Amino acid sequence: MTGMIDPLGRRSLLLGGAAALMLAGHAPAKRHGPTLGLADTTVRKELARDYAGTLRAAAAMGYGLFGFRLASYVANDPSEPTPQDKARMVRDAGMTVGVVRLGVRGADYDRQFDQAAAIGARIVALTTAPIFIASRTLGQTTRSALDAYIPQLAALGEKAKAAGLTLAYHNHWYDLMPIDGDRPLDLMASRIAPDLLSFEVDLAWAWYAGVAPLDLLAALGPRVVSMHLKDIDRTHGTAITDHAVTPGSGEMDYAALMPRIARLTRATGYVEVDNPEDGLAAARAAMAYLRGR
């Protein structure tokens, strides 16, 4: 794995060393490809207005799995459906409960693991490590804090395993940036046993960090149990999360990326656009592009 930006340009960065052994010239993903999932972040505003209706709309687009947070985006929000209600509505819409997300700040993980197991989830994802949101600057931490946190993450993996669940760590750009010479994600992977920690690879945040997404997938191998699919457009908006756009509408060349992903992993890809103006429109555009419609 390498954190250096490829001097041959963005297309080379996209493909990475792992893709050098693969044939070129593939077309975008075919219409009847692997099942795609949708992450609730993409349709967060629509869910707040009509949770069940939004799920039905997503299922009608062709999404087969839906990933959602166990806790509300807003603390103690009485209008937020319970995890049990969310799971019921997902199934009523004709989809399967996908990756469910754990809280980060002050989370009661024992309770959340029980909730996840009760609704039939198999994978629980940690959106980020608490150490990366402890300061005013997102993603900023110290090596000592990182070294102290990794055993805590391993212990969390033990609890998830005991509950019959797979714990997956979700990367951002900042945990692929070196701290005192080592990337946090590398240290997590090397210090924590594979049966205690898997990974949900966000392809766009890897790209944003200057890491070839295919190289990251190849390096983590079977530990990749889920992926987030979005694109990067650095001219869109001002905040980093504003740069997240639908696959195929940014700089990452998903037409070349998707066929090669299928050669590296069987992990399900979930469309996740962080802050779209219209979540359902973003989900529809992503599905149309990724299915080659």
Image: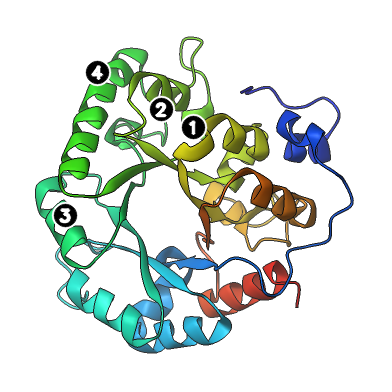
Sooner in the amino-acid sequence: mark 1 or mark 3: 3
Q: Position of residue 221 (x, y in %)?
A: 53, 35
Locate residue 61: give its quadrant. bottom right
User: What is the spatial separation of the Cα atoms under label 1 and label 3, in whole angstroms?
Assistant: 26 Å
Count residues near mark 3 (Cα–Cα under 10 Å), then give few for <14, some for 14-19, many for 20+.
many
The residue tagged 2 is 140
**Which residue corresponds to the image point at 23% horizontal and 22% vertical from the top-left?**
151
Is any part of residue 233 visible from this angle? yes
In the image, 17 versus 34, the foreground residue is 34
Q: Position of residue 66 (x, y in %)?
A: 41, 70
Amino acid marked by disc 4: Ala
**Above or below — where is 111 with respect to 151?**
below
Amino acid marked by disc 2: Gln
Is any part of residue 171 visible from this angle? no
Count residues near mark 2 (Cα–Cα under 10 Å), then give few for <14, some for 14-19, many for 20+.
some
Locate residue 50: give its quadrant. bottom left
User: What is the spatial separation of the Cα atoms under label 1 and label 2, in whole angstroms?
Assistant: 8 Å
Count residues near mark 1 (Cα–Cα under 10 Å), then give few for <14, some for 14-19, many for 20+.
many
Amino acid marked by disc 1: Tyr
